Amino acid sequence: QVQLVESGGGLVQPGGSLRLSCAASGSIISINVMGWYCQAPGKERELVATITSGGSTNYVDSVKGRFTISRDNAKNTVFLQMNSLKPEDTAVYYCYAPTVTPTLVEYDYWGQGTQVTVYS
């Protein structure tokens, strides 16, 4: 079993910053890609950013230049530095980590979600 525990959400004014963290623990053989998704009220969950174990990153256009994804492979932890936040960034943010377990099968795991609210 694998658990993803997120932290770092909160309330911030436009232009502010937040840093999200997500730590994976449990029966982990490897995690190639780790990522962040967000879901705003009434909308579907959508990709924000991903990062491979080698450090290659991918961002949705709306956050390019404002958000930075990074990871600590040794600690199976992924971070999302969110700068210049806008009200439209308000959403629940979920960590995502497809994980190879000791059975050598890859399973999808999600964090519990952390609320980010950007208000004027």
Image: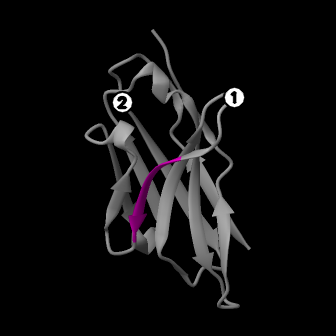
Q: Where residue 84 sits: x, y (%)?
A: 31, 27
Quarter of the picture containing the N terminus is: bottom right
On screen, residue 114 versus residue 48, left or right, reads right
Q: Secondary structure at mark 1?
A: loop
Q: Tell me if mark 2 has few (under 14), some (14-19) or many (20+) residues whose alpha carbon lies within 10 angstroms of its own.
A: some
Residue 116 visible: no
Seen at 39% across and 74% down, the residue is 53
Task: Choose top left, top right, bottom left or bottom right for residue 99.
Answer: bottom right
Q: Is residue 39 magenta?
A: no
Q: Is residue 75 left or right of residue 6?
A: left
Q: Would residue 57 be visible to someone looking at this image?
A: yes
Q: Nearer the viewer, residue 111 or 107?
A: 107
- Quarter of the picture containing the C terminus is top left
Above or below, 119 against 69 in this view is: above
Residue depicted at x 31% and y 67%: 56
- State which tag comes first along the sequence, 2 or 1: 2
50 is within the stretch colored magenta: yes
In the rendered image of this protein, does residue 25 appear above or below residue 67?
below
Q: CA distance from mark 2 to mark 1?
A: 24 Å
The residue tagged 2 is: 17
- The residue located at (41%, 47%) in the rendering is 80
Q: Quadrant of residue 98?
A: bottom right
Q: Which secondary structure lies at badge 2?
A: loop
Q: Which residues are magenta?
A: 47-52
Amino acid type of the residue that numbered disc 1 sits on in the rendered structure:
Gly
Identify which amino acid the numbered label 2 is placed on: Ser
Report the residue that reaches farthest toward the bottom.
103
The tag on residue 42 is 1
Q: Position of residue 41 (x, y in %)?
A: 67, 27
Residue 111 left/right relative to 120: right
